[in-house]
Amino acid sequence: MQFDYVIVGGGSAGSTLAARLSEDPDTTVCLLEAGGRGDNILVRAPAAVVAMLPGRPKINNWAFATVPQAGLNGRKGYQPRGKALGGSSAINAMLYIRGHAGDYDEWADLGCDGWNWDAVLPYFLKSENNERGGCDVHGGAGPLQVSEQKSPRPLTEAFIQAGESLQHRRTDDFNTGDNEGIGLYQVTQFHDAARNGERCSAAAGYLLPVMNRPNLTVITKAHATHILFDGKRAIGVAYRKGHRDKQVHARQEVILCGGSFNSPQLLQLSGVGRPEDILPHGIEMVHELPGVGQNLQDHLDFTLSYKTKDRDNFGISLPGGLNLMKHIHEWRKTGKGMIATPFAEGAAFLKTTQDLDRPDVQLHFVIGIVDDHARKLHLGHGFSCHVCVLRPKSRGTVGLVSDDPLAPPKIDPQFLSHPEDLEVLKQGARLTRQIMAASPLADYIHKELFIKGEPDDAELEQYIRTRSDTIYHPVGTCKMGHDDLAVVDPELKVRGLEALRVVDASVMPRLISGNTNAPTIMIAEKAADLIRGRVAPLKS
């Protein structure tokens, strides 16, 4: 089979890109996705994420693990990633966050011309159909449905009021370019009458509505095994479907949208990257590119959890189970209630010191007890608050464990390898505990889990090393730029090769100050215009 464009990976970027490129009826597009359609009830019902996130069993989830992390007392980290059309937007908390304007201006300062805040904002607007309508900072006609939360719990309002009592400003919009403050997240959720309250994954917003286009071919359960090259030119992709090996060819370009783990892995399996990462596995070198799999960055997260006697939240109890049945009925009827929740209802972006130009920690306030990514359950009811370091200085890697394309990648975030990350996380944890102890939120607390009393600095460090892990925002492993570790240029073309691009979160040169789903969709929107020549060529 031959097409103009072959896209590998139907996640947030791949779904967006396939839908945009296939708008031209004279352009043929093939999308390969290793997972399924991503449109069943577990995806559509937001609260059902609790069945997919733990990865036991692996439902729409790659459920990767890291190598043992020295900074986390030798523990292996857990890395859930979406495996379905929509990718991680099919299993995430639906939080719509763009980051801070300074993040993108910093990209431009690093040599990523055309990726400053003013240049990317139009693509955020293009993607968005915000329930609030269109304005200078929001789009009102895009495919991605962005909604107010349907039924935030009183517990979450108590969190916001507790933060206000400590002089953290309330904000009703974290996406203007300045995200400092405390409030409610907006979410990627349908707000029309027909699908009100359902998750709007990138696939649900962009791809599934156009699957009947004659120039668009979507192949699910198709695991890419390597890129096909003619010299230095990418000409197609080999993939495995069931027990059969197949190929698909590209007249124009091959575009990798596998994300920060799978895109560098596929490049390395195809002989592109560092010789020391490739040759030991018996793979022939095609092109030496030192940055492939380097520069991995992720938001390391520490979670505080509390038990409460309040049952207007998620928990394990007979009354809670009966209450949940009522909420299921309410969601099916109106799209509201706790089944519509993102779990992480409350947001805060805070500065650990006031001389910073932008917040350096983010809080996710969750209406349930979170322990080991919901893989450890607790009787009773409670709530949790995550705190993460927004701009970590630790850098990790992604590599191969073997030449087997079906093997998971070797993921080494090297969490806390830079000492400043630990200091920021300790300060962030203390800020968070102050909010937890403030009224009216303190009135909900029956007892704190996992931490005893008021830990000193050394004790808090041990709690962090024992309990911290990712909040699911890996980026950077095919970074954009012009330096020695840059894998793609600012037009997202792989350096030194022809007809090959990477379009996903792996191209971010630095991690943005927030959740990465909306920025990944923005990257794909901008890439579609770059590919179609709808924007001026960027400076070299």
Image (cartoon, rainbow, N blue to C red):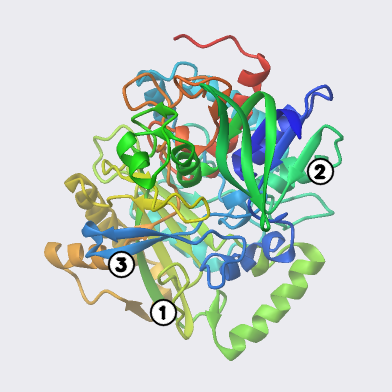
Describe residue 445's horizontal placement relative to residue 53 as left or right: left
- Give the answer, above or below, for where 269 lies relative to 162: above
Looking at this view, is 209 or 62 the one in front?
62
- State which tag comes first along the sequence, 2 or 3: 2
Quadrant of the rendering where the C terminus is positioned: top left
Dividing the picture into quadrants, the one containing residue 523 is top right
Q: Residues within 10 Å of mark 3 (few under 14, many from 20)?
A: some
Would residue 147 be seen by someone viewing this image from the given angle?
A: no
Residue 422 % position (x, y): 21, 52
The residue beneath circle 2 is 209
Q: Check residue 467 in the rendering and tell me which mark sits there, or answer none.
A: 3
- State yes or no: discs 2 and 1 in contact (Cβ < 8 Å): no
- Give the answer, above or below, for where 106 lies relative to 540: below
Farthest residue to the bottom: give it: 318
Looking at this view, is 402 or 9 the one in front?
402
The residue beneath circle 1 is 307
Marks 2 and 3, how far apart in space?
41 Å
- Give the answer, above or below, for where 449 lies relative to 439: below
Q: Amino acid at mark 3?
A: Arg
Marks 2 and 1, how far apart in space?
43 Å
Q: Check residue 523 in the rendering and tell me which mark sits there, or answer none.
A: none
SS at badge 2: helix
